[in-house]
Image (cartoon, rainbow, N blue to C red):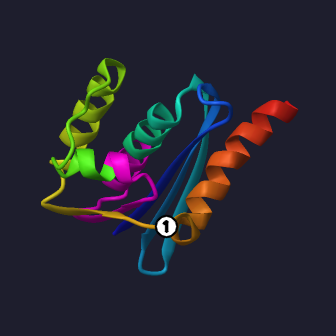
Amino acid sequence: MQLFTDGASRNNPGEAGGGIFLKDGDNEWTKAIYLGKKTNNEAEYLALIEGLKLAKDKGAKELELFMDSQLIIKQLRGEYKVKKNHLIPLFNEARTLLFAFSKWTATHVLRAQNKEADRLANLAIDSHDSA
């Protein structure tokens, strides 16, 4: 199963949203989540956490994760430490969820390769703003 997630924060910190695009063969699931006022990195982690929960709910055993946040990918792989105290619980939750899969990979992609998740993250903010 392939999972693409993205978090967006306007004015950082500011109004934030998360986008999730999950794909398994011909099956696709999407989710746009309004997150309130968050930093961009909080939004990235919260979108990831929701995406991992969705993948688990859909029965994924193996997962290919794609994000355009190089920082989060490198933290998940253990290449960077999580230095911000407010991100440590989010990192720990994401890592715990990842270890529920028998196999997983985390790959950094350019924003152009993460268009659907990016669109959904911004849609979540726009939908809230117009409500």
- Residue in the picture at 30% in, 59% down: 59
Q: Helix, strand, or loop for circle 1?
A: loop
Label 1, residues with CA under 10 Å away: few <14, some 14-19, many ≥20: few
- Report the label total: 1
Image spot of residue 105 (x, y percent): 23, 64
Query: Residue 63 vs residue 19: left or right?
Result: left
Whether residue 57 is visible: no
Image spot of residue 122 (x, y percent): 69, 47
Residue at the disc numbered 1? 110
- Residue in the picture at 78% in, 41% down: 126
Image spot of residue 41 (x, y percent): 45, 36
Considering only vertical position in the picture, is 45 above or below 67? Answer: above
Query: Residue 69 vs residue 126: left or right?
Result: left
Query: Residue 113 vs residue 65: left or right?
Result: right
Q: Quadrant of the N terminus?
A: bottom left
Q: Quadrant of residue 111?
A: bottom right
Q: What stretch of residues is rendered in magenta?
A: 50-72
Outermost residue on the bottom side: it is: 26
Image spot of residue 106 (x, y percent): 28, 60
Q: Quadrant of residue 89?
A: top left
Q: Nearer the viewer, residue 86 or 50?
A: 86
Is residue 66 on the magenta stretch?
yes
Q: Quadrant of residue 24?
A: bottom left
Identify which amino acid the numbered label 1 is placed on: Leu
Q: Quadrant of the C terminus?
A: top right
- Residue in the picture at 78% in, 39% down: 127
Whether residue 47 is visible: yes
Query: Residue 81 vs residue 38: left or right?
Result: left
- Residue in the picture at 36% in, 55% down: 55
